[in-house]
Image (spheres, rainbow, N blue to C red):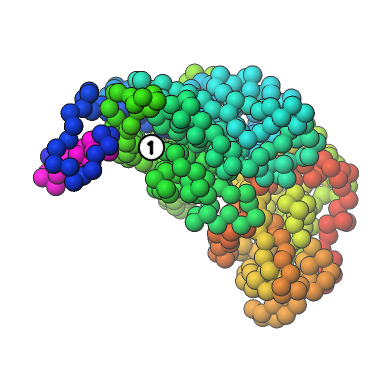
Amino acid sequence: MPASRFRSLSLLLVTIAVVLLGCSTQSSKLPPPSSELKVLEFTVLHTNDNHGKFWRNRHGEMGMAARKTLIDRIRREVEGEGGKVLLLSAGDINTGVPESDIQQARPDFVGMNKIGYDAMTLGNHEFDNPLNVLMEQEQWADFPFLSANIYYRASEQLVFKPWLKKDLDGVRVGILGLTTEDTEALVNSDYVEDIFFVNAVGAARTWVPVLKQDDKMDIVIALTHIGHYPNARHGENAPGDVTLAKEVDGIDIIVGGHSQNKLERPDIKNSTYILQAWEWGKYVGRADFKYYYMDNFDGKGNRKGVLKMINYRLIPVNLKRPEMINGREVWVNIGKEIPEDQAVLDALKPYHDKAQDLLMKKVGTLDKALSGERSLVRSKPAAIGHLLARAQMEKAGADLAVVNGGGIRTGLPAGEITEKDILKVQPFGNMVCYVDMKGQDLKRYIEDIADIRPVSGGFAQFANVKLTMKGDRLERLEIGGKPVQKDKVYRLAINDFSAGGGDKWPVIDDNPTFVNTGYTDAVVLRDYIKKHSPLQASEYQPRKGNIAR
């Protein structure tokens, strides 16, 4: 061992011993310990915002079968060295792709059982279905649903188990579930009329002392679906993980979801490690810890210990990137390819096959076909673009919407429209989002994207917008038939690809008001067609003067 590392390790052990024994570093003599210093090595594996992605995508990315292989490998490695493993989900199992949605996410829970999750917290999208469906899902799961801030209105009793105790070689770990209180405003009000959500941070402030003082937990993990907002700038969202860490003492680790952040390094606030692994099972988060403690207790049954993170990384699950090889696009793994677990494939394939049949189900009707030709949607306002933007605007409760022409892969046929037809139009699974902007900022943004020239995938298709461009300058902008007011706040619906700078659009997903709804564009279009069928093509034809460049 290099001398520098030896000195660092020695200093760490001395510091730990001092902390555990309650002594000042100035003491010339340490009191003899009643027992030797012990170390628990454990690993927290975590995912969040699965959104129905139980099966690999068309490029062979993600999927629960490959996730199972990866997690089993890590378990064997850690347990082979005497360590322990916890596997946690930060919620939003539901809602994302039709194959899962039409089966009420049953294949996702089958897959999670096979993988061996220890617990999950409730995400807001768990309430996209009536409460009885969620209760049925709880019965399907071999692991507990946790949330300490959801109550029945009538009895004021908790709906779900608030926390879970795990014993790791005698070390007591408490896992506390928390769900965003924004849920009531994000879902169908009929589905949550019998329950209510209290402030998650306030609930933690009540529960953490119970876990630490009354139930004598050595380590507390908050398993949350409240979002990670850097520097606690949560905008119009309810407070998230950073606020939780800053305002509630005693939480050692936060495993989070909801904001769908790719946290490649833990965010450490108030000595709390905040973790999040992006979305869809694209990555499995791996956090390796050592817990140093003395195996004795004070008069109140408490034990002193020190938790230290040893390593953290996000491990890709067969993610790929496109490369041009011999003149054609080939998708290449960014890491080592992970084989799919056969037992999980066998368990999930019946659901995947059944879904293919269900996808032929009728969603609605259209009187005349809407073209989605590449040359059309990438060069001029198109009825199909207007339809997609209208659907997203309605879902987000927005004042306007914009869709990138490159995300429209085909049109819709006249007559019956099936689930499969919708997936052909929008196959990428982009998430519908929204952001609030003042009129003056919105004008600058629209000027930038409206200036993108025809033929580009970034050509903008709008809903509820009338604009006039002169060269690269925006001369006039109307929303809902009225001129934009510079100080008025407008809500813009947009997909996550475009908001993140795709097609060289300005990046706006760092705006504090930015919200990912958790719905894919295809799901939003499907719901819109169901609601408004039979559709009249003429309703979506661009009006003369709707946009001039």
The amino acid type of the residue labelled 1 equals Ala
Displayed quadrant of residue 500: bottom right
Can residue 365 be spotted in the picture? yes
Percent position of residue 99, x then y: 66, 32
Quarter of the picture holding the N terminus? top left
Percent position of residue 467, x then y: 76, 72
Q: Residue at 22% x, 23% y: name it.
A: 35
Q: Which residues are magenta?
A: 2-19
Q: Residue at 79% x, 35% y: name it.
A: 193
Reply yes or no: does residue 291 show up in magenta: no
As drawn, 112 above or below 482: above
Residue at the extreme front of the image, as rendered: 299
Quarter of the picture holding the C terminus? bottom right
Name the magenta segment's main secondary structure.
helix
Residue neighbourhood size for the residue with mark 1, other residues' Cα within 10 Å, grouped as few (<14), some (14–19), many (≥20): many
Displayed quadrant of residue 112: top right
User: Between residues 154 and 535, which one lies in front from this camera angle?
Assistant: 154
Percent position of residue 331, x then y: 47, 45
Mark 1 residue element: strand
Can residue 339 be spotted in the picture? no
**Drawn side of residue 450 relative to residue 119, left or right:** right
Q: Which residue is mark 1?
A: 287
